[in-house]
Amino acid sequence: MPYASVFPLVTARALAREFTYEVEEGVERGAIVSMPFGRRRARGIVVSLGEAPPAGVEARPIDSVVGSVPPALVDLALWLAEYYGSTPGRALALVAPETPKRRKQQAPPAERQSFRGEDEPAELTPEQQAAIARIAAGGGPYLLYGATGSGKTEVYLQACAEVLERGLGAIVLVPEISLTPQTVGRVHARFGDRVAILHSGLTDAERRDERERIASGEARIVVGARSAIFAPLRGLGLIVVDEEHDASYKQDSDPRYDARTVAAKRAALEGAVAVYGSATPRPESWASLERLELGGRLAGDLPRVRVVDLRREAGYPLSAPLLSELRAIEEGGGKAILLLNRRGVAPALHCRACGQTIRCPNCDVALVLHGDHSLRCHHCGHSESVPEACPACLSADLARLGAGTQRLERELEREFPHLELIRLDADTAKTPELLNAALQRFAAADRVVLLGTQIVAKGHHFAGVQLAAVIDADTALALPDFRAEERTFQLLTQLAGRSGRDAPGRVLVQTFQPDARPIAYAARHDVTRFLDEEIERRRELGYPPFRHIVRIVVTGPEPAPVLRALEELRAGISGAELLGPAPLLRLRGRHRAQLVAKTERPRAVAAQAARLLAAAAPAMRRAGLSAVVDVDPQSM
Ligand code: ADP
Ligand code: ZN
Ligand code: ZN
């Protein structure tokens, strides 16, 4: 009988090691087994095989083999556990997720949730041909850089067709699948039932069916969000990461992996080519990947961007220039997209008498006024009704500060009775179906305005959008994060890309800071200049891509012990430039603080932190403290 080293698929850190079991002849690395584990049963993954158990180990037999994953995924998961400071059990659970029993067959979800596709173009541009040839020749990873509408998706499709011809498969990652029904639709229209789709909106049973179609080789092209990078494809030739700048590729719970980093690793392990595509690449990709450039958009010029200086123009949220653009649509027909990255009626309620803002009792943030006369916390979900008077001084003089999507909708209703309004935000687009229906409605209508949070700036393609407008470009810029400028630039450029697919589109950006770098460069579509300067700034400050960041956050019921725990951690970490500890906003009643390490050796620093935290665990538990180590965090 051979013996197998098996990692149990359990989350407890104390059990994060291999156990030896007896297995039948023929069991391979990557087999998923059911086995006795202590006094219960557990699932596990075979990571290696041997002829004899280690000395002194009494090996029990497994119960049965219940499935398998490609052996390369075992390597990938073990690498991921180490890089992100997670456990092998948790990382292996990503590649071998628990799925329920098979049920009756239903149409694969791709057919129900996606847009119709487009025909293959008669002729590829020379830039597209060059990019496809380079990808087909191997190597990489590549950055496929080109404006919105420059033909990137067509390159992905052609590259997928090429790997299919070679008998291999491809993974196409998209940011959040509910936001990209058109990309899914185009892949599906081109490749039919050779496509499987994976995302969090599927039921467990649907996911199981899709995984089986992938594992059996029936589906050779996988489209999906972040976790699709672990799809059990055998014979992987290509990984595409579409909209590679999108922050949703990073998972914000343990294991805190970044699907873009994992994609590069998986491609390297399996000899596949990784292609990262964007009109607004990350500085990290711009600095380190070989670039394949498609240039400008195929169907005409990029739209002219007009910056509206709110210091001079009254009427926020609807300035005079914006009103006149919308009036033109109300009279002459057409479509507009308006972005306002805040839900609700007003982001804060402020007392004119004593100057206080009404805050969440659990978090250090203002409560947001909603249309149903509630005040809601967008962090913890706390909700209360709007008070008659200021809770601090009892004055009735409460003022609404700023605007959210609901207020914007009301003002538009009043000003433009003949425009159809479609609001898209987390309050209206609760499911992929609702979102899809809203987008379909927008695609079909005329004299219509799509307004909403950043959902409206994602990769939707609509013909005949005359106007795209950013109501308040300063929201994203004000975030205390070294990526605030990058994010603002990406958001504005992406939204500008939504206008004028085939019409002479116009873009309006309302801001109090018209000279801010990301706003000025986005207005000129100057991606290269913005990125080159951003990279210089990052180099001076020692931020990614020049160094990695490891972020350690401790939370607890009182502020002092939180800071003290991080001070102790700071004293024990070497090989990094350390910033902090610095207090963060209180959330859900928990005080928080962070220590930020800039380092060339993120794994070593994360490992040190993990060791120190493990040693401090009993004391931390007594004080009610918890800690998170985040390698390459995407927000600060
Ligand atoms: P991106 O992904 O960069 O936004 P797409 O691949 O969606 O660009 O291309 C934009 C539009 O141009 C689509 O409608 C697509 O069908 C069309 N298109 C792509 N390549 C060509 C081509 N070589 N000739 C004509 N039309 C093309
Ligand atoms: Zn007051
Ligand atoms: Zn709260």
Image (spheres, grey):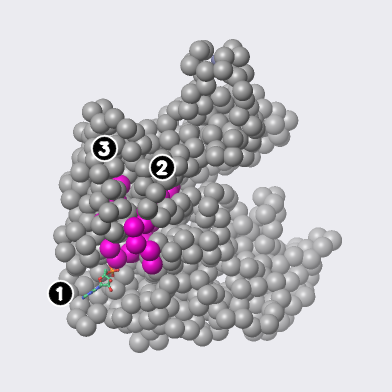
Residue type at mark 1: give it. Pro
Which residue, given by chain and number where applicable, does mark 2 sit on? 414
> Which of the two discs, 1 and 3, labels the residue nearer the N terminus?
1
The part of the chain drawn in magenta is 444-469
Q: Is residue 236 above or below residue 601?
A: below
Q: Residue at x 53, y 61 (%)?
A: 434
> Are there few (<14), some (14-19), or many (20+) residues within 10 Å of tag 1?
few
> Are there few (<14), some (14-19), or many (20+) residues within 10 Å of tag 2?
few
Along the viewing direction, whichever of 276 and 246 lies nearer the viewer: 246
Question: Could you say where residue 282 lies in the image, as x and y percent from the top left?
Answer: 31, 51
Along the viewing direction, whichever of 93 and 571 lies nearer the viewer: 93
Q: Is the CB–ligand 2 distance for label 2 below 8 Å?
A: no
Q: Secondary structure at mark 1?
A: helix
Residue 429 lies left or right of residue 534; in this view the side is right
Question: From the viewer's perspective, is the residue at label 2 or at label 3 nearer?
Answer: 2
Do labels 2 and 1 touch, CB within 8 Å? no
Q: Quadrant of residue 206?
A: bottom right
Residue 386 within the magenta-colored segment of the rendering: no
Which residue, given by chain and number where applicable, does mark 1 sit on? 126
Q: Quadrant of the image for the C terminus?
A: top left
Question: Is residue 51 something that shows in the picture?
Answer: no
Q: Residue at x 65, y 73 (%)?
A: 205
What is the spatial separation of the Cα atoms under label 2 and label 3, in whole angstroms?
15 Å
Q: Secondary structure at mark 2?
A: helix
> Which of the two discs, 2 and 1, labels the residue nearer the N terminus?
1
Q: Quadrant of residue 539?
A: top left
Residue type at mark 2: give it. Arg
Residue 165 lies left or right of residue 628; in this view the side is left
Question: Could you say where residue 613 lies in the image, as x and y percent from the top left?
Answer: 60, 37
Q: Residue at x 51, y 12 (%)?
A: 354
What is the spatial separation of the Cα atoms under label 1 and label 3, in whole angstroms?
44 Å
Which residue, given by chain and number where applicable, does mark 3 sit on? 320
